[in-house]
Amino acid sequence: MTPQEMLTKLRAQNPLVHCMTNYVAMNIAANVVLAAGASPAMVHAEEEIAEFTAICGALTVNIGTLSSPWLASMSAAARVAADNDIPWVLDPVAHFISGYRRKAAQNLLALRPTIIRANASEIIALSGQVGAGKGADSGDSVEAAQAAARALADQFGAVISVTGPVDFVTDGTQQARISGGSIWMPQVTALGCAQTALMGGYAAVGPAFDAAVACLAHFKVAGSAAAHTAKGPGSFQVQFLDALAATQPRDLAQAVA
Ligand SMILES: Nc1ncnc2c1ncn2[C@@H]1O[C@H](COP(=O)(O)OP(=O)(O)OP(=O)(O)O)[C@@H](O)[C@H]1O
Ligand SMILES: Cc1ncsc1CCO
Ligand SMILES: [Mg+2]
């Protein structure tokens, strides 16, 4: 499906997205999903997973502020998603900073995410190489992460989505590059985490590769538009939400190559 068709379908279906994200991202992620055209719910208690994940269009898991109870809930939710053929998106934030987080990311990967969305340093480290990531921030170029992305796509049968100045997506066979956006995007915390939540919304309405491309294009187009009137990262964040809502399906094609 084209990005235009994907955004049209997203808004027509308004899918429910189970978002398991970090404390930093909670508010911006929910607002991004709403502005774009889907319906977010932030649910983390393990006691609720069996009932809730099963009725959602997609699950998204982000390990940004991980702790043991959350990891147990995330693993349980990923199992429910896999058992019910519900697409799920993994965002392995800063998974290389500690043995605890590395192991958590490996355990979640073993549960076969449909899509992995991460910055270049996180993708490089997932493939076993040493990257230049600084906590949640990337220190590597997207180009440097492309070979790792292809290898991970083959290894895990997942769509791999690498973000940066020009995003790269591959499922091991198809690939796409998505351009646009603004230098203020990495200056707004948790915008990548919010993108992961929205990618779940797109995955609920179409094929995983097409979902990743459409979501990345929606961000780039809205980011470019917001940058026209913003004066810095603060006003950019506000304008970006408006621009996500204002983006028309036909606008998305221009961002994708
Ligand atoms: N220099 C840049 N120019 C244009 N767009 C960018 C740039 N850097 C990142 N982006 C865009 O910002 C969004 C988030 O990507 P980023 O790589 O910053 O994610 P992230 O590091 O996982 O974010 P976070 O962990 O803070 O949530 C993507 O849509 C990406 O295309
Ligand atoms: C800053 C930060 N720290 C943990 S998660 C997060 C949000 C960006 O990933
Ligand atoms: Mg991130």
Image (cartoon, rainbow, N blue to C red):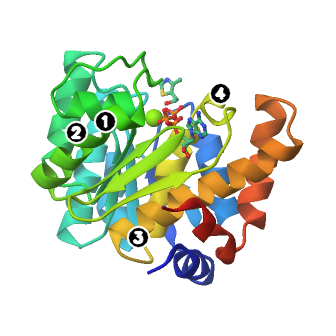
Compare marks 3 and 4 and give the one earlier in the sequence. 4
> Which label sits in the foreground, 3 or 1?
1
Any atom of ligand 1 within 8 Å of the CB at mark 2? no
In this view of the protein, can residue 42 be seen by the observer? no
Q: Earlier in the sequence, mark 2 or mark 4?
A: 2
Depth order, front residue of 52/241: 241
Mark number displayed over residue 187: 4
Tell me the kind of residue under disc 3: Asp
Query: Percent x, y for residue 9?
Result: 55, 82
- Mark found first going from the N terminus, 4 or 1: 1
Do residues under tags 1 and 2 come within 8 Å of each other at their CB atoms?
Answer: yes
Compared across the picture, whether 69 is left or right of 244 comes to: left
Q: Are marks 2 and 4 in contact (CB under 8 Å)?
A: no
Residue named by callout 3 = 210
Quarter occupied by residue 55: bottom left
Check disc 1 and report the residue beneath it: 145
Residue 131, percent from left and from top: 29, 20
